[in-house]
């Protein structure tokens, strides 16, 4: 009985293989700065990194997309709080959103500085 060996590698398997290798220190630093940059500059650092590095490095692309999606979610939350501020409830949401942004960005930065991939909770995945 002969068995056939399939040498084809699907793109999903290739992505898994690329994500399994440990990112370099430069990759970790770029991902960390991307997440931390969101606390001050909103979605701009993640957008710049994603545009510049999306074809070069799978780890940086993944983390930049994650940071970009989270910062877009934060902008939408601020807009919703702005609308709700007309009935005073939004005024309570502004500091809560700000604190959540700071906390989750710091957690993401710590995670990426170790070379781990980080997924934000409560995040709209708009960029795939």
Image (cartoon, rainbow, N blue to C red):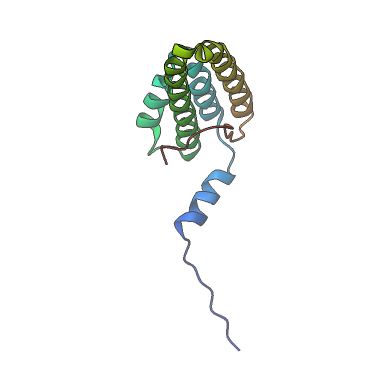
What quarter of the picture does the C terminus occupy?
top left
Q: Which residue is drawn at 42% across and 22% down?
A: 43
User: What is the count of numbered marks?
Assistant: 0
What quarter of the picture does the N terminus occupy?
bottom right
* Nearer to me, 71 or 25: 71
Residue at far bottom of view? 1
* Nearer to me, 40 or 7: 40
Q: Residue at x 59, y 38 (%)?
A: 22
Residue at far left of view? 51
Up-down relation of residue 46 to residue 92 (above or below): below
Q: Quadrant of residue 19?
A: top right
Residue 76 image offset from top left, x and y in percent: 43, 24
Residue 89 image offset from top left, x and y in percent: 53, 15
Q: Which residue is drawn at 47% across and 66% down?
A: 8
Residue 39 image offset from top left, x and y in percent: 51, 15
Residue 56 image offset from top left, x and y in percent: 40, 37
Q: Is residue 12 left or right of residue 56?
A: right
Up-down relation of residue 109 to residue 124 (above or below): above
């Amino acid at each position: 009985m002969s068995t056939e060996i399939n040498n084809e590698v699907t793109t999903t398997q290739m992505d898994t293989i690329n994500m399994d290798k440990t990112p370099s220190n430069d990759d970790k630093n770029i991902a960390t700065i991307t997440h931390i940059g969101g606390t001050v500059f909103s979605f701009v650092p993640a957008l710049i990194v994603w545009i510049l590095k999306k074809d070069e490095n799978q780890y940086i692309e993944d983390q930049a997309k994650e940071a970009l999606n989270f910062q877009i979610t934060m902008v939408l939350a601020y807009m919703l709080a702005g609308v709700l501020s007309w009935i005073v409830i939004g005024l309570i949401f502004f500091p809560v959103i700000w604190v959540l942004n700071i906390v989750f960005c710091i957690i993401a930065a710590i995670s990426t500085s170790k070379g781990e991939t980080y997924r934000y909770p409560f995040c709209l995945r708009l960029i795939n």
